[in-house]
Amino acid sequence: MTALAVIAKECIPGRVKTRLQPEFSAEEAAWIAAAALADTLGTVGALPSTRRILYFDGVAAPEGAAGWELLPQVGGSLDERIAWLFDAVDEPLLLLGMDTPHVDVRWFDPVFSGWSERNGDADAWFGPATDGGFWALGMREPAGALVRGVPMSTDRTGARQLERLTGAGMRVRLLPPLTDIDTAADVPAAARRSPALAELLRSLGTREFAS
C-alpha cells in the first residue's frame, strides 16, 4: 500500500528548464520539459500504487496525466510545498520529480512490495541526485516536518534531507543516484531511456553537447 506522487509544473516557455538555454530556445526547453514529464508519467504510472498523484503547478494538465489524481501545489518555497504533500497523504508515499524520465522502475520493486520484513523494515527511501539534490523521497509514515526547512536547490540539499530522515531515527534505504535534466549536457543521456524525449531530439536535429 503505497501512494505515488510526481511533482511537476506546467511546461510554459520561459518558466521551465531555463538552464537549457542558450543551447535550446525557451520554446525548445519547454518541449523538453514536457517530453520528460510525459515519459516520467508513462514509466512510473504502471507501478502498483494505491494512488497516483500529479502534484501540479499550473492550469493545463498534460495529456499523460489521464487517470492521475490532479492535486494543485500550494504556495510557498519548494520545501514548504513538498512538506504540505507529505502532511496531506496518510499512507506510505513515494514522491518523484519530473526531471528523471530515465529512471528504471525495477528499482522500485522493494518499495511497492511492502514496508516491513520484505524490504528490511525501511521507514524511508531516498534517491540522491548527482548534483547534490534528490530525485526521490519516500516515507512509510509521511511527515512534512522532516522536509520543511530543508534548503532546496543547493549542492547540500540531498545531504541535509538525508540527515533529517536519519536524525529522526528512520531506517533509510537508498535508491541509485540519478542525474536530473538540468543543463543541455544532461539531455542526451536521459534521452537514451526516454522515448518521448528521444523522439523530440530527433525532430530537432543533431546537436553537439559539452561532455
Image (cartoon, grey):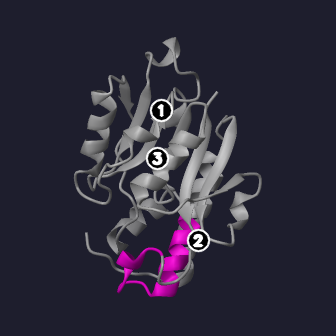
Amino acid type shown at disc 2: Glu
Give how far across and how far down residue 18 sits, in percent: 40, 78
> How far is the residue under mark 3 from the one under mark 2?
20 Å
Q: Residue at x 61, y 70 (%)?
A: 58
Give how far across and how far down residue 51 sits, in percent: 69, 40
Residue lying at the far right of the rendered structure: 67
Residue lying at the far top of the rendered structure: 117
In the image, taking residue 167 as reference, residue 83 lies left or right, namely right
In the rendered view, would you say 93 is above or below 187? Answer: above
Q: Secondary structure at mark 1?
A: strand
Amino acid type shown at disc 1: Met
Q: Residue at x 25, y 58 (%)?
A: 154
Give how far across and how far down residue 26 sits, in percent: 46, 86
In the image, taking residue 96 as reference, residue 166 lies left or right, namely left
Q: What is the magenta range? A: 16-36
Q: Which residue is mark 1?
A: 139
Q: Locate residue 177: give its quadrant.
A: top left
Can residue 144 be seen here? The reply is: yes
> How far is the residue under mark 1 from the one under mark 3?
12 Å
User: Looking at the rendered structure, which numbered label has been put on residue 83?
Assistant: 3
Q: Which residue is mark 2?
A: 10
Is 32 a magenta residue? yes
Q: Secondary structure at mark 3?
A: helix
Q: Mark 2 or mark 1, which has the lower sequence index?
A: 2
Residue lying at the far left of the rendered structure: 156
Quadrant location, the C terminus? bottom left
Q: Residue at x 42, y 58 (%)?
A: 78
Q: How many neighbours does mark 3 have within 10 angstroms: few (below 14), some (14-19), or many (20 or more)?
A: many
